[in-house]
Amino acid sequence: MQRRVVMVIFEGFQLLDMAGPADVFAMAALLSGEGDYQVEVTSLREGNVRAVNGIAIAVDTPLADVTGPIDTLVVVGGWATMDLLANRELVDGIARLAGSSRRVTSVCSGALLLAEAGLLDGMRATTHWLAADELRGRYPRVEVDSDPIYVKEGQVWTSAGVTAGIDLALALVAEDHGHALARDVACALVVYLHRPGGQSQFSVPMNALPPRSEPLRELQAFIDANPADDLSVPALARHAGMSERHFSRVFTEQSGVSPGRYVELSRADAARRLLETTDHPLERVAREAGLGTPETLYRVFRRHWRISPGDYRRRFQAKEC
């Protein structure tokens, strides 16, 4: 059985969004001995299509000329995606190909193109964590979950950013051929078959706005610089020269989060930096980050990054070259 994989690219696309899944399919075809995955690349125009890193990919068949049944449609992403959502030729072309595809997938911000084509309405979907708010804001009918590496809704699959396209392709191979072949492909490519954790481990939880008020901006800087201090609402209100009630209201209005929430996010970020840059035991990390105990440190990391502090350090601690 031949499995036709059509990948949609565009000027400024993310090369790894395309190359990662393409290599997974190629390795699966090689190791299975069946050669059943046939990858094609298409774009609005034939000829060279340049990725954001400057490498050009040759497209033989433009989008409008792609016909016939498709096993898997892959819409890649890249920061140029945002400028292409109003391009009806591209969006309508993706919708047309989706109609003749057994399953439809996206990598990274390619999910926005699927959403613009109406292919994610009423569905749960994911994308690169940096594009999640854009997807959520533009397409309220899409249930955006910014943590998973990939999400399957029926025959529509969406994945997180860049290398997550490899995870997605391995899952598609497992669905087609079973986990044994997917495991062999992962081993051959030296990647995880099932990557531990979600993409929140790669994101930064701080999403507060800078307040309009200069004293409150200075207070935020004080919080960030002194995570182990008394940062209770009464102490912060005294520091700002306001009543507790007035301080809480103004801080929340101007920053978008409550004082308590901001303090927790700031301390979580401080703990993250300590884990990345020091060998301090967890007791000291928790104390210096203002979190008190390793138990609190663990709860905060599980809440914000879905990972333990120890696992985070093993993956992200800076090493000497």
Image: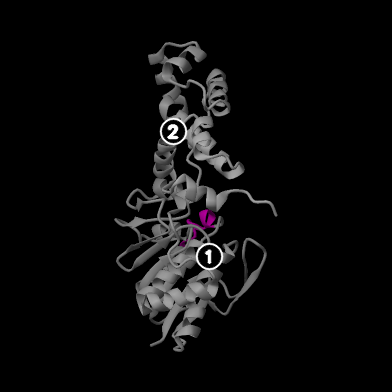
The residue under label 2 is: 293
Q: Quadrant of the N terminus?
A: bottom left
- Residue density around tag 2, few if under 14, some if 14–19, many if 20 or more, within 10 Å: some
> Cα distance, mark 2 to mark 1?
41 Å
Q: Is residue 226 magenta?
A: no
10 Å crowding of disc 1: few (<14), some (14-19), many (20+): many
Q: Where is residue 101 shown, x and y percent of the image?
A: 37, 75
Query: Which of the two discs, 2 and 1, labels the residue nearer the N terminus?
Result: 1
The residue lying at 42 percent from left, 79 percent from top is 181
For discs 2 and 1, the disc positioned in front in the rendered view: 2
Find out whether residue 87 is within the magenta segment: yes
Query: What's the mark number on residue 159?
Result: none
| Residue 204 against residue 147 in the figure, above or below | above
Image coords of residue 291 (percent x, y): 46, 31
For the point 41% across and 67% down, which residue is it?
Answer: 105
Amino acid beneath label 2: Thr
Circles 2 and 1 in contact, beta carbons < 8 Å: no
Residue 139 percent coordinates (x, y): 38, 50
102 sits to left or right of 304:
left
Which amino acid type corresponds to the residue marked 1 in the rendered image? Asp
Pointer 1 residue: 17
249, above or below 85, in the image: above
* Along the viewing direction, whichever of 5 and 27 lies nearer the viewer: 27
Of 84 and 124, the residue lying toward us: 124
The span shown in magenta is: 81-89
Quadrant for residue 257, please give it: top left
User: Which residue of the protein is positioned furthest toward the right in this rendering?
Assistant: 321
